[in-house]
Image (cartoon, rainbow, N blue to C red):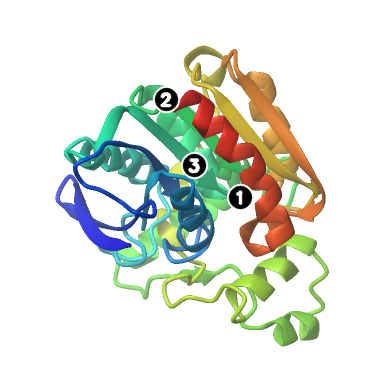
Amino acid sequence: MESVTFKNKSLDVAADIYFPAGFDPARTYPAIVSAHPIGSCKEQTSGNVYGTKLADEGYVVLAFDATYQGDSGGEPRWIEDPGPRVEDFRCAVDYLVTLDYVDEDRIGVLGICGGGGYAVNAALTERRFKAVGTVTGVNFGRMMREGDLSPDAAITTLDAIAKQRTAEARGAEPRVDSSLPDSPEQADELGVTALDVLEATKYYRTPRGQQPNGATKSLFSHMGPAVGWDAFHLAEHLLTQPLQIIVGGIPGEFGAYRDGFDLFNRARSQQKDILVVPGQSHYDLYWKPEATEAALAALVPFYNKYL
């Protein structure tokens, strides 16, 4: 593995490249861009699980930190804005095509959770991606609009964002939200019952998946663009690449299960498949061996066929 940086305009994007065994820089290899979940980082599931395993199967894998997050550049920190997030993917391809050992005609993309929604959205207009994979992919814009599921949830959220942004423009302290309890014990004390929140806490707040940059933080005043964004917008017109969708058979509150079927139904791709992994949840697909092995059992032959 090698740590590198590439540019998204003036910002440095930090990434890790995972290499196949016996890597020979004189040869050319297919490559996959691997994108982390929202609030995550390249050292978690996109890199240390899927990046490692796909490299074992002969792929050069580039796992990157989103701009404004992790080891990547950008101020203020913890911005979750679909615009730069999607541009990161295009810049990742720009970097890969400068590497003599990458076959520019065999580049694919993989996104996990919110990274799956971003990967799809990037592939709509980035034709250098020849195959698209998602693991428990989530349409982050849909999540932001639903909020508390009331009819005016999106408007209420936007009003709050506007008020906070005005306050910060006048010198108030930035509001940085943490989306999870500090520990599973705190989740119990708070009476948290939502499956995805409980499992996220066990992943991000314990040695199971904990990493310094996997902070699950967001700058609230900059969340407005996400509310008006749809990861799958125009998928019925522009998404023609082969598509492999993977979701867990235990649906959670974050909506990956229904987003997977929504994407499957909307995508124009002629070669598309959705795999439901029985008995596994959203977060099982981040780390649990039987869940990730089932996902990889679909992803590897998919990428082998189309890359």
Are the two marked residues, 1 and 3, in contact with CB atoms closer than 8 angstroms?
Answer: no
* Within-10-Å neighbours for mark 1: few <14, some 14–19, many 20+: some
> How far is the residue under mark 3 from the one under mark 2?
11 Å
Residue type (three-letter) at the residue carrying disc 2: Lys
In what quadrant of the picture does the N terminus appear?
bottom left
For residue 123, above or below residue 5: above
> Which residue is the site of mark 1?
156
Residue type (three-letter) at the residue carrying disc 1: Thr
The disc placed on residue 110 is 3
Residue 199 relative to residue 24: left or right: right
> How far is the residue under mark 2 from the one under mark 1?
39 Å
x and y percentages locating residue 286 in the rendered image = 62, 59
Q: Please report the residue visible at 28 percent of the width from the left and 37 percent of the height from the top.
A: 93
Q: Earlier in the sequence, mark 1 or mark 3?
A: 3
Res 73 visible: no
Q: Earlier in the sequence, mark 3 or mark 2?
A: 3
Residue 90 relative to residue 97: left or right: right
The disc placed on residue 200 is none
For residue 214, above or below residue 133: below
Residue type (three-letter) at the residue carrying disc 3: Leu
Q: Is label 3 in a helix, a strand or a loop? A: strand
> Which residue is the site of mark 2?
130
Q: Please report the residue visible at 61 percent of the width from the left and 50 percent of the height from the top.
A: 156
Point out the frontmost of discs 2 and 1. 2
